[in-house]
Every structure is written in structure tokens, then in C-alpha cells.
Amino acid sequence: MNQKTVQQAIEYRRSVRVYDSEQKIKASTVKKCIEQATLAPNSSNMQLWEFYHITSQSVIDKIIPLCFNQNAAKTAQQLVIVTVRKDLWRKRAKANLEYLDKVYPPKPKTKQSSREKFAKNYYKKLIPFVYNDFLGIFGFFKYLTVLITGLFKPIYREVRSKDMRLVAHKSAGLAAQTFMLSMAGEGYDTCPMEGSDTWRVKKVLGLPLGAEINMIISCGIRKPEGVYGKRFRIPFEEVYKEI
């Protein structure tokens, strides 16, 4: 299959509910698309995601009923499960600091550039401030501090645990969309499924308590009946606002 341009991939991508069992997809190509998904923009470059590439039919068979037997799951050749790992924020912040140490080798503070100081303090101080919490108590006090400070100047307000959870899911969603467009560019089809018993899916994958399922994406090659009608979108004029 010829690779598509970005515009062609966007136009080609549809949520496919029925896949052709006769046309096989390559696990190596799906893996490449997952790798491209990791290049997606994400909040503070924290990369609080993991991608579970399910190629085993026995595991797919376990997940199908957990997706409520949707056709998109029943006929899928492979699955990609995008997970959010907000619980790994310390590990990811450390990885960013280690990378910054390579970019900016350690030196006395007097010789550090303002950009170097800001970047390192961002992961040493700001990231722990917004991600640290204990039973919502610390988050409540952070929220009050931000609320009061925000009366006098613009300030970042999403500092509670539930706010950071939303941030992590938004980043995972960007990666999921990047993956699906990459798949479309290869002539492969996908369907993002939010309808699933996420607790049981986590159990199948052996995920820890702190992990969350962002979405399950089925993969394959479409059958004509797998696309349920023409694409419908609200008129562009209703959703586009130029200011």
C-alpha cells in the first residue's frame, strides 16, 4: 500500500467497526505507528502513557467481552490499549532531569544560563508541586493558594489531583490520535473504543492500581460495511470562531 499524505490520512481515517479477516496487518507496522505516537505533544514532556500492543488472539478473546462484544473488538486483528500512568510522574520527571543534565552539564549556578535554571527548576520544583498530593488534602491547599494568588495576576490554576489526571488523559488522547492517523497513513484501519470495563481490562493486562485506561483501539483492514455510513460533522461555521 502506498503511504498517504497527512491530508489523505485524515480524510481516509474512519472509525471502522468490521474488519476483513482475509486481509492481515503486520504487527511490525502497528508497532512503528505506536512509536510515532510517542512523538505526540504532551504536557511538560512528562509522557505519562504506556501502549499495550495486543497481538495474541487468546488475550484479544479475553478483552472482547470486556468491550461488550462490539464488532470493532470481535473482528479486530490486533488491539492497542492506551494507558495513562500519572502514578509514574516522579520517574518521568527524573528522566527529564537526566536528559537536561546531558544538554546542560552540571556547573556552578553562577555560570548557568537563565534557560538552564528555569528548565531544571521546572522539573525539580514546579512538577512536584503540581503532581504531589495526599488524599486530596495537599491539592485543596494548593487550590486555595492559587485561587488567592490568581486574584492579583494570571496563574496556572489546574493543580489538584483531578486536574492533573485530566491533563494526563489529554496527552494520552493526543498520542492515540497520532497513532490512528499514522495507521491511516499506512492504509490500516482503527476504531477507538471508550466503551469497556476498564477495571477488568486492567486486570487482564496486570496493571497497577494507579494506571488508567485511556482508550482501546482496534486495528485491521476495513470491510465496506465496517464504515457505518457517510461521515457527519456539524457545519464548520458553527464550530469555527475567528476573533
Image (spheres, rainbow, N blue to C red):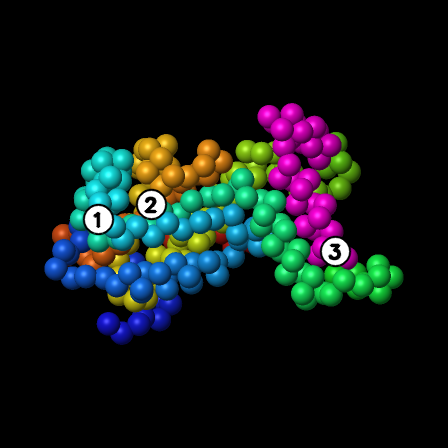
In which image quadrant can residue 213 be found? top left
State the residue position of label 1. Answer: 57
Q: Secondary structure at mark 2?
A: strand
Residue in front for this viewpoint, 162 or 64: 64
State the residue position of label 2. Answer: 216
Q: Earlier in the sequence, mark 3 or mark 2?
A: 3
Q: Earlier in the sequence, mark 1 or mark 2?
A: 1
Residue 26 lies, in percent from the top left, at: 26, 63
Question: What's the distance in space between the residues labelled 3 and 2, CA to CA?
Answer: 37 Å
Residue 122 versus residue 200 in the image, above or below: below
Residue 69 versus residue 107 in the image, above or below: above
Question: What's the distance in space between the residues labelled 1 and 3, CA to CA?
Answer: 48 Å
Which residues are the magenta region? 117-146
Residue 159 lies, in percent from the top left, at: 63, 37
Q: Which class describes the residues within 10 Å of circle 2: few (<14), some (14-19), or many (20+)?
A: many
Q: Earlier in the sequence, mark 1 or mark 3?
A: 1
